[in-house]
């Protein structure tokens, strides 16, 4: 006992005074108030730490870090929701699951803004194959945003051009502080150039100023986009979506370089000037390189009416406005309507984008209605001229792809299964019927041999019976079974994503936007006014598909480096193609005459040409993919 005490005291002597007091003092009991104070203190430290991180991220990094946290949190929630609720037992609740996911994605894109709007629009361009709630939400994703203050604009000018936008020593004589338009990555101001010797009139310009936060956020946003697409492909949906990431990211980076946009505009102007069928009816505004940098671009100001202003377009072209919406033309516009009606505008638009796809291989990928201005022709003031603006996003297609694209169109319009299948197989794509329907934006059933290669007559009959039985079975499938079928068919559709030409993503976006520049709800009211697609909502006065097909077919006759025999053969194919297109003409005019008769009998005019095709295409998507395509998915 005494030996133990001596040992303990000896051990204590080896410790310092503070340690001795700690060991010898009685234990202090922790009270609830002490514990609460500790928790409050820790919480305050945590909140202060996160607040400081938020402030630093907002001030020096344009909130890019916290935007990514929001993105990853949302996508993790979507993944978990699908993993837990996409089951056969919860089949009846799958529409509600799609609705929740659509709301989360839409809120994410609109909350983050900037490049997220562009990414959302790239996804939404092909939203017809997404669940119905996503089709509806993505159709509402518009590229508009609050303006940045003039003080920020002034900083951008001093950084990029070394001078303020106006005032003594300024870049411009007059610079309007209020922007005339503001989108996700830039805003546009109206300005007046300083007068130069020999000038006979004032020169007003449109000045596009990039928002500073966008450049800081870009790589963070694209990194988050890459991570999300990988997560969706490998964890959540098991669908091939990651293959498009590099292509879309590269083109979105290009859109932030205004020097690149200025070069695109000049290149497009050269193409237009060298195309006799368009040189007089299309105009590309002149860019001023001396007042342009990577973040500021100055171009000629155009007085006119944007195609998005439907009442004003009707007034400018002398068409009646059946909805009686108020219209106000700029003071510079003539009081007498321009000749040709809206049909003349739409004819030029379809021809312009057909030339881009089939002749030039140089395609504007953002032809929304705000980027098309209609004005009186400067030297022929009674006729309209189409002005194309915003040249930030173009895709260039190789000669081999362009030829395949032309062959695909010829095969689709002629209903030739073998020709379409030949091209789609080279692109690593299956389901030729679906490829044709998605490209033409109309239902397309391709002619194919009764018996496949190596197939006996009995086997062919049994195969067709199985296909018919399966179509009947689909009518009774649950939501879960239809979703599983859609996933399976989409994998069959994209059989080899490495071989798929990535340019198709933007080409389809271009065609979808050209077809649907006007909201479809005006289709019946404007049944005798506009063109198919833009046309579609405006009554289909010109046949978009036929015009595009003619440009596709004729482009082969004008291909360079053809021998006399090859060129003769291409002209023969072109003439045969025109005879095949006569049947499409008959269908188009049959529909037009039917609408005219019904209107004059006091009946509802019924569906326009493209509305009828669209309705059938929705049925085709339902039967082939199990996809319930919303009518709003066809709006531009």
Image: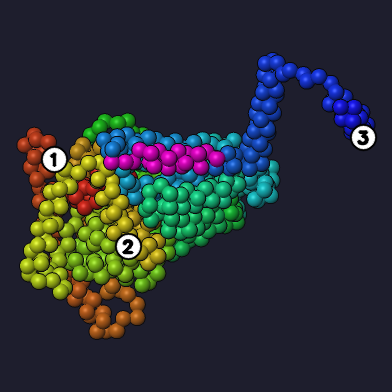
Q: Where is 81 relative to 22, above or below?
A: below
Residue furthest front in the image: 1
Question: SS of the residue at dot 2?
Answer: loop
Which residue is under mark 3?
A: 14
Which residue is under mark 1?
A: 606
- Front residue of 379/591: it is 591
**Residue shown at the point (70%, 23%) measured from the top left:** 38
The quadrant in which residue 564 appears is: bottom left
Left or right: residue 108 versus residue 23 is left
Spatial CA distance of label 3 from label 2 is 77 Å
In magenta, the rendered stretch is: 69-88
Q: Main secondary structure of the magenta part?
A: helix
Left or right: residue 441 versus residue 5 is left
Spatial CA distance of label 3 from label 1 is 102 Å
Indicate yes or no whether the magenta region holds residue 75: yes
Where does the image place residue 104, in percent across and percent down from the top left? 42, 36
Task: Decide if residue 30 is in sight here.
Answer: yes
Where does the image place residue 419, in percent across and percent down from the top left? 22, 69
- Front residue of 474/310: it is 474
Question: SS of the residue at dot 1?
Answer: loop
Q: Mark 3 or 1, which is nearer the eye? A: 3
Q: Earlier in the sequence, mark 3 or mark 1?
A: 3
Left or right: residue 373 versus residue 208 is left
Q: Earlier in the sequence, mark 2 or mark 1?
A: 2
């Amino acid at each position: 006992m005494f030996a133990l005490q001596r040992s303990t005291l000896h051990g204590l002597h080896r410790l310092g005074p503070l340690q001795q007091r700690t060991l010898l003092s009685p234990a202090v009991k922790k009270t609830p108030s002490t514990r609460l104070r500790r928790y409050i203190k820790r919480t305050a430290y945590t909140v202060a730490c996160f607040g400081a991180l938020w402030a630093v991220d907002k001030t020096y990094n344009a909130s890019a870090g916290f935007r990514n946290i929001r993105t990853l949190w949302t996508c993790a929630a979507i993944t978990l929701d699908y993993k837990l609720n996409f089951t056969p037992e919860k089949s009846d609740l799958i529409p509600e699951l799609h609705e929740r996911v659509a709301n989360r994605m839409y809120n994410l894109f609109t909350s983050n803004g900037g490049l997220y709007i562009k990414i959302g629009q790239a996804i939404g361009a092909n939203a017809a194959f997404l669940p119905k709630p996503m089709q509806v939400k993505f159709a509402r994703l518009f590229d508009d945003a609050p303006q940045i203050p003039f003080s920020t604009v002034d900083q951008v000018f001093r950084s990029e051009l070394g001078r303020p936008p106006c005032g003594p020593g300024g870049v411009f004589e007059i610079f309007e502080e209020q922007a005339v338009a503001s989108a996700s990555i830039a805003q546009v101001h109206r300005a007046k150039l300083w007068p130069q010797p020999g000038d006979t009139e004032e020169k007003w310009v449109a000045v596009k100023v990039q928002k500073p936060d966008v450049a800081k956020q870009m790589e963070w946003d694209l990194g988050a986009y890459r991570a999300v697409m990988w997560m969706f492909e490998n964890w959540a949906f098991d669908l091939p979506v990651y293959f498009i990431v590099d292509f879309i990211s590269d083109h979105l980076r290009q859109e932030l370089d205004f020097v690149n946009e200025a070069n695109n505009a000049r290149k497009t102007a050269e193409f237009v000037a060298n195309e006799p069928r368009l040189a007089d009816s299309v105009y590309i505004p002149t860019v001023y390189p001396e007042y342009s940098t990577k973040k500021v671009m100055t171009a000629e100001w155009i007085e006119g009416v944007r195609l998005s202003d439907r009442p004003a377009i009707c007034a400018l072209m002398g068409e009646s406005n059946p909805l009686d919406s108020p219209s106000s033309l700029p003071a510079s516009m003539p009081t007498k309507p321009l000749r040709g009606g809206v049909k003349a505008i739409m004819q030029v638009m379809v021809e312009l984008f057909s030339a881009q796809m089939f002749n030039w291989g140089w395609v504007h990928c953002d032809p929304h209605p705000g980027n098309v201005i209609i004005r009186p022709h400067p030297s022929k003031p009674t006729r309209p001229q189409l002005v194309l603006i915003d040249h930030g996003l173009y895709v260039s297609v190789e000669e081999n792809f362009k030829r395949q694209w032309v062959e695909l169109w010829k095969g689709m319009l002629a209903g030739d299964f073998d020709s379409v299948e030949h091209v789609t197989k080279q692109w690593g794509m299956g389901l030729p019927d679906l490829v044709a329907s998605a490209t033409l934006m109309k239902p397309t059933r391709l002619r194919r041999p009764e018996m496949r290669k190596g197939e006996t007559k009995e086997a062919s009959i049994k195969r067709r019976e199985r296909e018919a039985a399966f179509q009947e079975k689909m009518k009774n499938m649950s939501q879960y079974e239809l979703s599983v079928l859609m996933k399976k068919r989409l994998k069959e559709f994209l059989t080899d994503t490495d071989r798929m030409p990535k340019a198709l993503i933007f080409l389809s976006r271009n065609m979808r936007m050209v077809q649907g520049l006007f909201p479809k709800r005006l289709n019946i009211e404007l049944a005798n006014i506009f063109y198919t697609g833009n046309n579609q909502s405006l009554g289909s006065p010109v046949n978009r598909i036929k015009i595009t097909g003619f440009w596709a077919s004729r482009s082969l006759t004008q291909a360079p480096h053809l021998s006399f025999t090859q060129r003769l053969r291409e002209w023969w194919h072109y003439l045969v193609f025109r005879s095949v297109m006569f049947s499409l003409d008959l269908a188009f005019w049959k529909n037009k005459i039917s609408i005219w008769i019904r209107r004059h009998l006091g009946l509802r005019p019924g569906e326009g040409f493209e509305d009828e095709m669209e309705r059938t295409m929705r049925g085709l998507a339902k039967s082939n993919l199990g996809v319930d395509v919303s009518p709003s998915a066809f709006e531009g």
